[in-house]
Amino acid sequence: MRLNNIQPGEGSKKAARRVGRGIGSGLGKTCGRGHKGQKSRAGGFHKVGFEGGQMPLQRRLPKRGFVSMTKARNAEVRLSEIDKLPVDEIDLLVLKQAGVIPADSLSAKVMVSGTINRKVTLRGIGATKGALAAIEAAGGSVSAE
C-alpha cells in the first residue's frame, strides 16, 4: 500500500449536491428552495426558534427549573418498619404489599431510624451508610440486584 493509493471505502463518500445545473439534475431553477419567501433568498436567515414575531415556544412555556419528576415515587423506609415485617427476604414488592411504601413507588431506601434486631436480606433496595451498618451488625445483608 502507498499513500497515493489510499481512498475512502466504497459508498462512504457522497457527491456534493450541485444545484442550479438544469432541469435534468432535479435541482435546477429554484435549486430546491421552493418559490419566494425568506428562506428562498440569499442571506434569508432567521434565528433558531424564531416564529415570525409570534411569542416563541420556549418563552410561552412556564419556567420550571429542575424538579425531579420521580422524586415523589422514591420512598423512604425506617429500620424499625423493616424490623416489624414478618419475612426475612425483603424487596420492593414485599414493602408494597405490607403497605410500608405507596403502591406506585419506583424505588425505596432504608434510613437509620429506630433499631433492627433480626437478620434480614434486602434485595433491590438502597440503604444509607448507617442503615447498612445496622443491618450488617444484626447479621443481615444488602444486595443491589
Image (cartoon, rainbow, N blue to C red):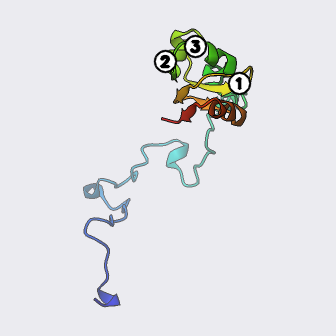
Mark 2 → mark 3, Cα distance in angstroms:
13 Å
Q: Nearer the viewer, mark 2 or mark 3?
A: 3
Q: Residue at x 54, y 23 (%)?
A: 106
84 and 37: which is toward the camera: 84
Location of residue 48 with respect to 55 vertically, above or below: below
Residue type indicated by callout 3: Leu
N-term mark: 1 or 3:
1
Measured as percent of width and height from the top left, residue 17 is found at 36, 61
Location of residue 98 with respect to 144 vertically, above or below: above
Q: In the rendering, which numbered label is found on residue 93?
A: 2
Is disc 1 placed on a helix, strand or loop?
loop
Residue type indicated by callout 2: Leu
The answer to whether one can see residue 63 in this image is yes
N-term mark: 2 or 3:
3
The N terminus, quarter of image: bottom left
Q: Residue at x 32, y 82 (%)?
A: 6
Q: Nearer the viewer, mark 1 or mark 3?
A: 3
Measured as percent of width and height from the top left, residue 89 is found at 49, 23
N-term mark: 2 or 1:
1
- Residues at marks 2 and 3 touching, judged by CB atoms closer than 8 Å: no
Where does label 3 land, which residue? Answer: 85
Q: Residue at x 63, y 38 (%)?
A: 50
Where does label 1 land, which residue? Answer: 62
Q: Nearer the viewer, mark 2 or mark 1?
A: 2
